[in-house]
Amino acid sequence: MSGSTVSITANPAARRRPLVVGETKTNNIDFLPNEAQINGGDLAINNVIGNDKLAASHSKDKPPFHSGDYSTSGTQLGLSEFEARIAEVESFLKTTVKMIQVQVEVVDAKIENEVGGLRREMDKKIDAKSVFLESELRQLVARNEELEKSMGELKAVGWLSKEDFKKFYEELKKQQGSELGESNVSLDKIRTYAREIVEREIEKHAADGLGRGDYALASGGAMVVKHSEPYMAGKGSSWFLMSGRSGIHPDAVKMLKPSFGEPGQCFPLKGSRGFVQIRLRTAIISEAVTLEHVAKSVAYDRSSAPKDCRVSGWLQGNDIDLAIHTEKMFLLTEFTYDLDKSNAQTFAVLDSAASRVVDTVRLDFVSNHGSSSHTCIYRLRVHGYEPDSVSVMTMEY
């Protein structure tokens, strides 16, 4: 039945059934309705039916739209306009966002292009600057090498030390002939004296570098009369290449000539031990001997320089082919050639031989500075003075 309801309620006043012996007590409630409840339900149903009929009869006299219906329709119209506005705004926002996105992409592309151009320009400038700096660095390295070379040459020359200047000053005061005070020695006098020393050194250099007579000079009449086996690299046995008197190699004379500091202008002997025997230009009382090797500044290899040496002398006489009498030979000097010193090193004759006359000397070297194949003799000099004939006869006999 339309619009009717049925209400069934529990009877609160329902009577409880008494417990039977042997049953368990429970809280079950008897829901069976009584007569009043049933009558009341029918009355409620009839009231609902009557109300529905009354509402239907009234609806025929009223207009189709009442105030409640008009309010609901207006609200729906307002919501539709609001939703349309929202859709319009959303469309506008979407369009705006798309335009902004396009503009941002254009700006990004332009910025990237500009940045790329700047980057390429900077790379070119950096490359050009790098080339320039590299060129400058090479020039700086070259200048530094030149400076180091110049400093090395200056160190090799050797500057006047404080002690040397004191000696120089004392010699200047002695040359003046009296003990002069420092205030009495003018700068002009010091310059004049220094100029005289330089001129003497230049004259010494012109005089064979030492300013001492050399009686073993080939141009003065000295000669090589014997030597150990020479060294001729890549030319087979050196003994087959010898020519001249008594098996003397033609290059042996180089030991008795100035080499002028040129590398290779020497006489090489095989191995690290050997000897050379020289007939002097005349009989002398020897004072010193000088052994020369190529200078360190121009040498390719100095390992072939002789190291431990011994020089002996005796009076051979006119017949140079005679055998040497060992009792006539005596030691003039022993020395070690030092590569860290000057290329021409002079060694004094021993006191025991300072008054004895010699016309023949022999250089024996028993080691060199590292070469196992050969030893080079650039030049050997013998210094001394000629005695008078009476003293010579006295010394001989």
Image (cartoon, rainbow, N blue to C red):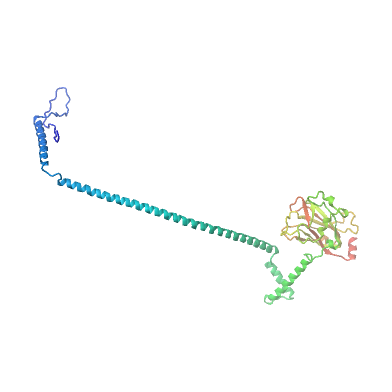
Q: Nearer the viewer, residue 72 or 201?
A: 72
Q: Residue 195: percent from the left, percent from the top? A: 73, 72
The answer to whether 222 is drawn above or below residue 196 in the figure is above
The answer to whether 168 is drawn above or below residue 20 in the figure is below
**Quarter of the rendering containing residue 23:** top left
In the displayed structure, does residue 206 sit left or right of residue 66? Answer: right
Q: Nearer the viewer, residue 209 or 392?
A: 209
The answer to whether residue 67 is visible is yes
In the displayed structure, does residue 17 sit left or right of residue 367? Answer: left
Q: Residue 8: percent from the left, percent from the top? A: 14, 32
Residue displayed at 17% across by 45% down: 69
The answer to whether residue 181 is visible is no
Q: Nearer the viewer, residue 333 or 236?
A: 236
Q: Residue 91: percent from the left, percent from the top? A: 32, 50
Quadrant where the N terminus lies?
Answer: top left
Residue displayed at 25% across by 50% down: 81
The answer to whether 324 is drawn above or below residue 198 in the figure is above
